[in-house]
Amino acid sequence: MSALSFCAESHAGCLFRRECIVTVTSVVGLQWGDEAKGKIVDILTDSHQVVVRYQGGNNAGHTVKFDGETYKLSLLPTGILRPGVKAVIGNGLVVNPEALLKEIQSLTDRGVPISGENLMVSDRAHVILPYHIVEDAVYEKRRGEQAIGTTGRGIGTCYRDKALRSHAIRIGDLYHPNSFRTRLADIVVAKNLMLKALDPSVELLDADAIFTSYTRYAELIKPYVVDTTAWLHRALQADANILFEGAQGSLLDVDHGTFPYVTSSNSSSAGIHSGSGVPEREIDRMIGIVKAYTTRVGGGPFPTELNNEIGQHIRDVGHEYGTVTGRPRRCGWLDGVATAYGARICGVDEIAVMLLDVLAQLDEVCICEAYEIRGERTTDFPSHVEDLEVAKPIYRRIPGWKQDITGARKLSDLPFGARAYVDSISELMGLPVKFISIGPDRAQTILL
């Protein structure tokens, strides 16, 4: 499908013609990630022809139920599962070519067609190389109890080299073998010196072996590699409906999150322009995804964390284990202060409340509506973790509903407690709730 033919195409029963409303939509998580964004992206893909991932790497993931099958995606945008939809890996990602190829193979083995017709990878995206993964492990080991809790996949170390520039390799560089070999040799010398100084037991890296393997990867991913920025601007000119898919969550944003317990990219909506080349002013609709409770993975303060049987109950019922790592997630009550902050920095228009069904068996549910920090009440989210570490949550308590809600299909089907809970979320955030997810299947979604 060419960019210029978008408006003449039909998809999933919706005709994309000139008289149709053209929308550019963004889906962004408002917490510490794992908000079930993939389900909403999947639903919205029915009315969009392009799905763009704009930041992160294979440290994040989406679990999507599609045609009775469950898919766990890491680098590939959710749109890859939909016939006729273009999936775009933007320039803001850091890409491990080996991981990308494995993910492509895992989907093609299950009958999902992937080619240059439905997958594009930016030639400006930066490449994760073996030394990034080794560095990641060495740094976390040296931090000891102060470890950030990275996934160990070299994401942060690759983004660091991107900022430093001199040690950065982009996907497009792989197709200039002479300069790639020369630069790689210089980089590996420097990396080996640094790694040996940090950890004398580390195994030295071989530049020739890396060059050989990455040259092979480059040939295998070549059908997908294009200038995605130029392509996306042509798609905009052709009135394509484009959906931006965030990874992780706004509270993990490197600039606006709980630094240093964050990811290494702009996981809030701030990353859309820098990670795709599309101006944020092009976006018509910004949807914030809110899990009905709060989870986070790795280190960092978590005011509403429940280190008790309720927290374990939420973890078990919600299957709160990492899509990529399998790590158990820390669980707690919904933090309305943190979530409202995420909505503000992202400029969200509306809210999707996810996994409401997980709370159905509890006698009482709570939402943090304010913090007490050193004796003062505040609804502002602290900018420094030292303040967040001493924040005491002030809860709004709502009677539980103690009944299965997975069969609800409209708002009036929800029991009083569930409706009161959703209304409280909307009130605390000052935004309308437009989606309520009450189960993993697409049909288990109330649209308002």
Image (cartoon, rainbow, N blue to C red):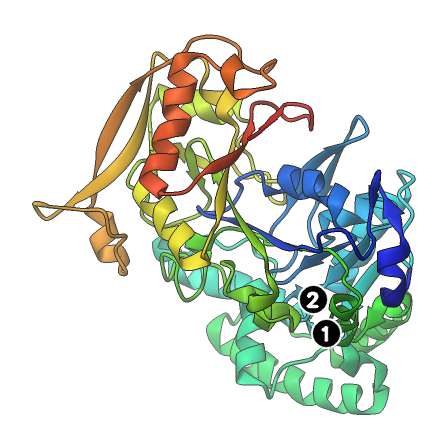
Q: Are marks 2 and 1 in contact (CB under 8 Å)?
A: yes
Residue at left offset 26%, top offset 37%: 369
Q: Residue furthest front?
A: 19
Residue at left offset 63%, top offset 62%: 54
Mark number, residue 12:
none
> Relative to 244, is 121 on the left or the right?
right
Mark number, residue 90:
2
Helix, strand or loop for disc 1: helix
The residue wearing badge 1 is 229
**Type of the residue with mark 1:** Thr
Q: Residues within 10 Å of mark 1 (few under 14, many from 20)?
A: some
**Type of the residue with mark 2:** Gly
Quadrant containing the C terminus is top right
Q: Residue furthest left?
A: 375
> Relative to 48, is 387 on the left or the right?
left
Rendering coords of residue 96 (x, y %): 71, 63
Residue at left offset 61%, top offset 13%: 407
